Structures are given as C-alpha cells and as structure tokens.
Image (tube, rainbow, N blue to C red):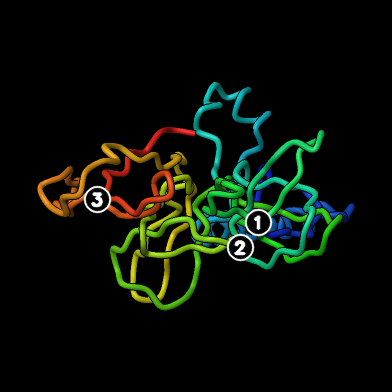
Amino acid sequence: MSYVNSRVVLNLPRQPQVKDVDTYKELLTLYNSLQIFHAQVSKYLGVSSLTATQLVSDGVSESSRVGELNVGTVVITEAVAVGDLINIYTAPAAKGRLASKAAATRRPAHCIALDAGTAGATIRVCYGGYVKAGSFTAGASLYLSTAGGFSTVKTQVVGECSQQVGVAVSADYAILYPAQPFRVYAYNPQSTATGGLLQDESGAVLYASGPISGVTKYYEPVLVPM
C-alpha cells in the first residue's frame, strides 16, 4: 500500500523492518491499518494533496488542489502583518508591498500575507481563499482600502482603485480573494443633479461629488479595468 501525499507526516517505514515471517505478517496488517487511518484523517482535515507533477501524470492537471498551489513567496519592500493585502510589482524582479486604493499610488491587491515581515524579508502569500477572522456583517462585500486593509465601503473617488477583495461569510469570518481591480473615472462631470443617475446591481444610486478642475461637481463614477 502506498502512502497518501499529505501535509500530516506519517513517520513509518513502508514495510515492517523485521526478518521473522510471522512477526512481519502481523506487523504488516497493523501498518496497513495505520496507513488507511492516516489517509482518512488527512482527507477529513483537508490536508491530503497531489503534486502538480502527479496531477499531470494522472491527466487531471486542471484539478490541482488550491491549498497546495495557491501559496507562494515574495520579497517584501516594507513591513507587513499577517492578513495584509499585498500588491505584487516589478522592481525589477517581483516584489511585494501593501496594497492601497489611494489615487496617488493605486496598488491593487494580488494576494494576502501569510507571514509578518520587515523590508527585505521573504514571506509566504496566499493568492485567494484566505479565511480572515474578525467581526463582520454576514454577506457584506469587502473592498480594498489603504495600507493593506479592506473596508465594506466601495470607493467612488475619482482616481482611486476600486476592487472587491472578499466577502463576509458569517459574523466571525470572511473569505479574502482579490478580484479584478478598476480605476474610478468621472463621467458627466458637469452634472449638478443628485438623483436619477446610474444605479448599481443592488439599486443604489451611483453618483458622487468631488473636485473636477478645481470645482466641486457631482458625477457618475465609471469603473475602468486596470
């Protein structure tokens, strides 16, 4: 019987290391039982996996386990904490920094930090499906904020980065998964009306106000893919 590929390590030889035939047979039964138990525990905990090479050899490369292939590493250029949203950029090699919606920087989130670290450190990152503990309103969408954080408020500020980064699945947990980022552009900047403009999918009126050429005006924020 072969071992299951699992992150729960079973430190056991593949066969009993004895020469006596009768003892070998008795131990082999125990070994097989332990390996079956190990496979069942691994499956129950969600830690059994196949490597990319094994999946390709089995002809199911598109079914690779997210938990195994959704984690990578990156060198960060500023201090980050566990759970921070991270922007990946070229400098010239791939580097990581805190994601931000701010118009002056516009750093969309690409992944979530699994480790804390200071500038120059190499940390693990998750590219989606990260479980975040906290206090949430179940069902609320989460959007990129500043300094690697998130908010329940979707920005309508011209020039900022609008990006959904997760959803609250309960009052205590959220799932983070950085989605397509958009840049907010102003549409119809001459309008002075505050109603009857575009609505989003939930029926909320899509309008905002802010300085356009130095004058505060109402506008319909248009999202352009980044």
Residue 98, numbered label: 1
**Looking at the picture, which amino acid does disc 2 mark?**
Ala
Asked if one can make out residue 4 in the rendered structure from this viewpoint, the answer is no
| Left or right, residue 53 beside residue 205 | right
In this rendering, the label closer to the viewer, 1 or 3: 3
x then y, percent, for residue 207: 24, 50
Q: Quadrant of the N terminus?
A: top right
Q: Residue at x 40, y 59 (%)?
A: 142
Q: What element carries label 2?
A: loop
Q: Which picture quadrant has residue 209?
A: bottom left
In this rendering, the label closer to the viewer, 2 or 3: 3
Q: Which picture quadrant has residue 179?
A: top left
Q: What element carries label 3?
A: loop
**Looking at the picture, which amino acid does disc 3 mark?**
Tyr
Which residue corresponds to mark 2?
147
User: Of label 1 and label 3, which has the lower sequence position?
Assistant: 1
Q: Which residue is drawn at 58% across and 45% down?
A: 110
**Looking at the picture, which amino acid does disc 1 mark?**
Leu
Around disc 3, counting alpha carbons within 10 Å, would you say few (fewer than 14), some (14 to 19), or many (20 or more)?
Answer: many
Q: Residue at x 54, y 64 (%)?
A: 149
Which residue corresponds to mark 3?
207
Asked if one can make out residue 181 in the rendered structure from this viewpoint, the answer is yes
